[in-house]
Image (cartoon, rainbow, N blue to C red):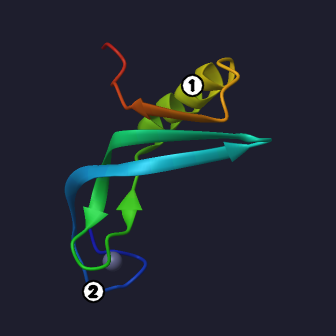
């Protein structure tokens, strides 16, 4: 698809890093599947992936650490 940020690039399948901040905790999720703009690098994450990210963030918050880093693992089909 055409990138809606720069209007020039085309998006291609790739991965991105998503960061959540809440209270005093930061959750970083690496290797998140996304459509990434080849021009400006903007990443578009699908709705079902976002749902899984929120689950990961919710589980990570239970760990009581200030910074947590996870690698995205797709849910079993
Ligand atoms: Zn772009």
The image quadrant where one finds the N terminus is bottom left
Question: Looking at the image, do the residues carrying marks 1 and 2 touch, with CB atoms under 8 Å apart?
Answer: no
Between disc 1 and disc 2, whose residue precedes? 2
Q: Which mark is residue 19?
A: none
Residue 66 located left or right of residue 74:
right
What residue appears at the point 54 percent right and 48 percent down from the top-left corner? Answer: 19
Q: Residue at x 43, y 79 (%)?
A: 5
The x and y percentages for residue 39 are: 24, 79
> Is the residue at mark 2 in contact range of ligand 1, meaning its CB lies under 8 Å from it?
yes
Question: Residue 37: x and y, percent?
Answer: 28, 69
Residue at figure coordinates x 40%, y 46% from the top left: 46
Q: Which mark is residue 8?
A: 2
Residue 41 point in image, percent of width and height = 32, 70
For this orientation, the residue located farthest to the front is 66
Name the residue that disc number 1 marks: 55
Q: Is residue 19 above or below residue 56?
A: below
Quarter where residue 71 is shown: top left
The nearer-to-camera label among 1 and 2 is: 1
Position of 65 relative to 50 (above/below): above
Judging depth in this view, the residue of 67 and 58 nearest the camera is: 67
Q: Secondary structure at mark 1?
A: helix
């Amino acid at each position: 698809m055409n990138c809606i940020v720069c209007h020039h690039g085309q998006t291609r399948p790739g991965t991105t890093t998503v960061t959540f901040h809440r209270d005093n905790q930061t959750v970083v999720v690496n290797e998140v599947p996304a459509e990434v703009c080849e021009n400006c690098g903007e990443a578009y994450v699908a709705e079902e992936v976002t749902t899984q990210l929120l689950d990961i963030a919710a589980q990570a918050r239970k760990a009581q650490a200030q910074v947590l880093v996870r690698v995205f693992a797709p849910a079993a089909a």
